[in-house]
Image: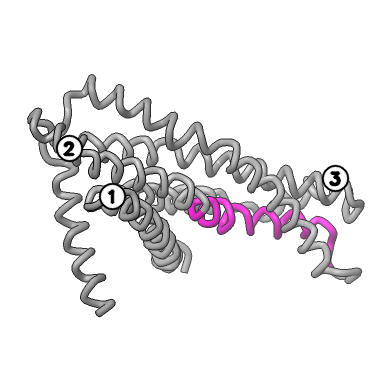
Amino acid sequence: MLIFRILKNLGGYSLFMTQVFRKPEKFRVFLKLFFREVDDLGMSSVGIVSFFSFFIGAVVSLQMAYNMGDNPFIPLSYIALATRESIILEFAPTMISIVLAGKVGSYIASSIGTMKVTEQVDALEVMGVNSISYLVAPKIAAAMMFFPILIVMSMFLGILGGWVASVGSGVCTSSDYILGLQSYFKPFYVIYALIKTEFFAFAIATIPSFYGYKVSGGALEVGRSSTLAVVWTSITIILLNYILTQLLLV
């Protein structure tokens, strides 16, 4: 049954996470692994995050302009205001995290799964290394440190894309757009987005690691674990998004 499998996986995930923080590696070893993970998980995602953010920001601003129509009672500056709120509150932290769940999550699950089926994980255990902490702890630290940087970059590029699209298509002037960006701005919205990002980053680093670590078999099982990891990470992000919104905004 589905509920039984979910409960079983939740129990396995809980036990898995207790092993992550037990018997950590020496700081010098951890630091080396940390910087490698920053490059693999964070720096390699800059391009796709930039592309998505810029063009989604452009699309959001044009849709806002279309929905407003020619209503004389709505200032044109509201195009930028609505674009800013959409990007900061929802698009940048949540949608980009789902994109990262697909890109980074599949990479984590497949890389750890491949190590498991090729017995590299067993070799670490034979050498007396806590393989779960060795493989997962640097990924958690790298994701929770670098993903907020990606989200801030996404906010900036999304708003920039909205400006380029709005001004370039003639739906509003540059001064109207800048006025809208400055209107009714609440700094807490940025803090809210970054708090969500930290939770999402933890899920993106740990859930695929769990699915990759429990792989047994061959390449087919590695592929299946990667798919399950992306699916359940995305579901977790959506659920966390709802819970955190209720706690922080409502």
Residue with the mark numbered 1: 218
Residue 21 location (% of width, % of height): 17, 41
What secondary structure is marked by label 3? helix
Q: Nearer the viewer, mark 2 or mark 3?
A: 2
Q: What number is the disc on residue 175?
A: 3
Q: Quick one: 2 or 99, which is closer to the camera?
A: 2
Q: Quick one: 89 or 109, which is closer to the camera?
A: 109
Residue 204 location (% of width, % of height): 38, 50
Q: Marks 2 and 3, Cα distance to the nearest angstrom?
A: 56 Å
Q: Would residue 144 appear left or right of 136 to someone viewing this image? A: right
Place residue 69 in its image quadrant: bottom right
Q: Is residue 225 above or below residue 163?
A: below
Q: Would residue 186 appear left or right of 84 to someone viewing this image? A: left
Specify few, some or many for label 3: CA neighbours under 10 Å numbering under 14, 14-19, or 20 or more: few
Tell me the amino acid under the disc marked 1: Gly
**Are circles 1 and 3 on residues that touch, CB within 8 Å?**
no
Residue with the mark numbered 2: 131
Q: Earlier in the sequence, mark 2 or mark 3?
A: 2
> Which span of residues is magenta-colored?
74-98
Tell me the amino acid under the disc marked 2: Ser
Q: The N terminus appears in which quarter of the rendering?
A: bottom left
Q: Quick one: 37 or 220, which is closer to the camera?
A: 220
Asked if one can make out residue 188 in the rendered structure from this viewpoint, the answer is no
What secondary structure is marked by label 2? helix
User: Which residue is at a point 44% across and 44% down the rendered structure image?
Assistant: 104
Q: Marks 1 and 3, Cα distance to the nearest angstrom?
A: 59 Å
User: Which residue is at a point 58% across and 43% down the rendered structure image?
Assistant: 49
What secondary structure is marked by label 1? loop
